[in-house]
Amino acid sequence: MEAICPTLVTCAVDPLRQALAVLRQARTAHQPGRCRLLGAHLEGPFLAPARRGAHPLEHLCPPSLAALQQRIDGFWGPAAGPGGGGVDAADIALVTLAPELEGAAAVIEALRDQGIVVSLGHSAANETEALAAYDAGVAMVTHAFNAMAGLGHREPGPIAAATLRGDVALGLIADGVHVAPAMAVLLQRLAPQQVVLVSDALAPYGLAEGVHRWDERTLIVANGSCRLEDGTLAGVTLPLLDGVRRLASWSGQPEWAIAAATVLPRRVLGDRRPVQELLVGRRLPDCLRWSEAGGELDWQRAS
């Protein structure tokens, strides 16, 4: 893994600012050859309550410039909330919100002015509301089909709107549970240049199946997917590479599965360089490709 965009889920203001400060320190201490920490992905708190999934209701809040400034400095004037300085827009790469909520338009504009990517997620937006959000600069759907309307033949919803536009990235959790394999393959066939794999990984990442603690709640891990005790899907514990393997095995098109985890996410975050330029200066053993051998996907060095 060359780089990651760590996700911070909905929480109180002070813990959020503390987490962002720690992330900034870790990014400053980066060493060559190690996985890079990109800016944070804030998933919340501007989410639709009815579509919140595992996000705690008590920490959701309506979108507003004041609430944004309370969490992230640098939008105007001095910090407006608790937590002090040391956290600003430069620490954020991506924000997930529900664009149909009152006040969201101003927040989207402020985030885009700071160069932060805005993504639709945990949203009750219909097709019309989603199109308006995309026109306003929302550039991604956080996890297609999850915590939002699906593809309806009379109510197309935000996924259809994004697919038809052609310039909105479609985040996909490829664990086979959040989205059925057939629907994952269908989405990629409809929009191969738009699907980007997202890990949706939680704190128990890489741990064995069973029961684990998550904040004050319990997570039940089975087949790499996490649920709360009431059955609500909460994320996965699988490496992103496992998602690539699964999507490639379902579709029979490993090249698109690889692109969805490498080149296409870079484009979402603004890196538009061609693949050849991305490889310049890299060590040959670091440049890998997929091949199919014995019915399984294996890594090989690039020739």
Image (cartoon, grey):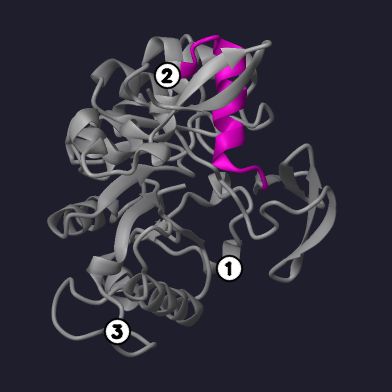
* Cα distance in 3D space between marks 2 and 3: 40 Å
Say which label, 3 or 1, has the lower sequence index.
1
Indicate whether 74 appears above or below 184.
below
Using the image as rendered, state which of residue 175 and residue 105 is in the foreground: 175
Q: Which residue is mark 1?
A: 58
Secondary structure at badge 1 equals helix
Picture quarter with the C terminus: top left
Kind of residue at badge 3? Gly
Evaluate if marks 2 and 1 touch, with contact meaning CB atoms under 8 Å apart.
no
Q: Residue at x 49, y 17 (%)?
A: 254
User: Is residue 289 found left or right of 133 in the rendered image?
Assistant: right
Q: Position of residue 240 (x, y in %)?
A: 55, 40
Kind of residue at badge 2? Trp
* Cα distance in 3D space between marks 2 and 1: 40 Å
Instruction: Indicate which label's residue lies in the foreground, 3 or 1.
Output: 3
Instruction: Indicate which label's residue lies in the foreground, 2 or 3.
Output: 2
**Is residue 233 shown in magenta?**
no
Q: Which residue is mark 3?
A: 86
Q: Residue furthest right?
A: 210
Q: Position of residue 45 (x, y in %)?
A: 45, 61
Q: Residue at x 38, y 88 (%)?
A: 82
Using the image as rendered, state which of residue 19 and residue 97 is in the foreground: 19
Residue 99 seen in this snapshot: no
Q: Position of residue 58 (x, y in %)?
A: 58, 68
Say which label, 2 or 3, has the lower sequence index.
3
Write the start and end of the magenta stretch as one range: 237-254
Label 3 Cα neighbours within 10 Å, binned few <14 / some 14-19 / many ≥20 = some
Evaluate if marks 3 and 1 touch, with contact meaning CB atoms under 8 Å apart.
no
Using the image as rendered, state which of residue 67 and residue 198 is in the foreground: 198
Instruction: Indicate which label's residue lies in the foreground, 2 or 1.
Output: 2
Q: Which residue is mark 2?
A: 256
